[in-house]
């Protein structure tokens, strides 16, 4: 392989898809080489499985993580007691929009639909009403045009 795995900033175009995380509080890219630290995904022997290291439970209970249809991941400091609309607005203003972050499909705040455990989370409700735990790392941020489709969206940008 001609990929320099020690320098992920220079990945071939075909491998760049799937890499990409954004810190909405800082309105800045999280470099691929830092993602495992930011999202606490470093395996260790705290909870080994058949002698192999595993990723331990997350300790960060202040930041929520959101995935989009196109493998982008966004992080924001938020509490489950916050209103869905407030979190979406802070995410949009913090870089989850097509103007600030090319490759993101959200042109307007209304395009963002938060989805957790099979439920669309509605504005005017707290995240905790949908049983989102503190520090949740698996919330979807879907584009409203993909809600209700029977098949996945077409390949991304």
Image (cartoon, rainbow, N blue to C red):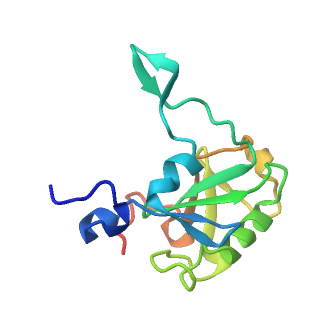
Image coordinates for residue 74, horizontal then vertical, percent:
58, 61
Closer-to-camera residue (140/6): 6
Residue occupying image coordinates x 56% and y 70%? 144
Looking at the image, can residue 11 be seen?
Answer: yes
**Residue at horizontal 85 percent and vertical 50 percent from the top:** 81
Q: Is residue 154 visible?
A: no
Question: How many numbered discs?
Answer: 0
Task: Tell me where residue 64 appears, x and y as whole percent.
Answer: 67, 52
52 left or right of 94? Answer: left
Left or right: residue 106 versus residue 83 is left
On-image quarter of the N terminus: bottom left
Residue toward you, 91 or 30: 30
Q: In which quarter of the image is residue 135?
A: top right
| The C terminus: image quadrant | bottom left
Q: Residue at x 51, y 54 (%)?
A: 34
**Viewed as shown, does residue 150 lie left or right of 23?**
left
Image quadrant of residue 108?
Answer: bottom right
Q: Position of residue 133 (x, y in %)?
A: 72, 40
Residue lying furthest left? 1
Q: Quick one: 72 or 5, which is closer to the camera?
A: 5
**Residue extending farthest front:** 6
Q: Where is residue 39 in the image (x, y as percent from the top left)?
A: 57, 47
Residue that appears at 76% across and 60% down: 84
Residue sitting nearer the eye, 28 or 131: 28
Determine the residue located farthest toward the top in the rendered image: 50
- Judge whether 113 appears above or below 1 on screen: below
Which of the 4 image quadrants contains residue 91? bottom right
Q: Is residue 6 above or below residue 97?
A: above
């Amino acid at each position: 392989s001609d990929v320099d795995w020690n320098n992920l900033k220079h990945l071939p175009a075909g491998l760049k898809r799937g890499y990409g995380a954004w810190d909405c509080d800082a309105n800045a890219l999280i470099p691929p080489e830092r993602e495992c630290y930011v999202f606490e995904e470093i395996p260790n022997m705290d909870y080994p499985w058949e002698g192999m290291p595993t990723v331990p439970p997350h300790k960060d209970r202040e930041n929520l993580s959101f995935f989009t249809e196109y493998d982008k991941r966004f992080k924001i400091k938020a509490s489950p007691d916050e209103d869905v609309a407030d979190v979406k607005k802070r995410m949009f203003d913090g870089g989850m929009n097509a103007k600030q972050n090319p490759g993101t499909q959200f042109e307007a705040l209304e395009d963002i639909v938060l989805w957790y455990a099979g439920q669309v989370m509605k504005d005017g409700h707290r995240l905790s009403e949908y049983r989102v735990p503190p520090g949740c790392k698996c919330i979807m941020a879907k584009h409203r045009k993909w809600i209700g489709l029977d098949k996945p969206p077409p390949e991304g940008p």
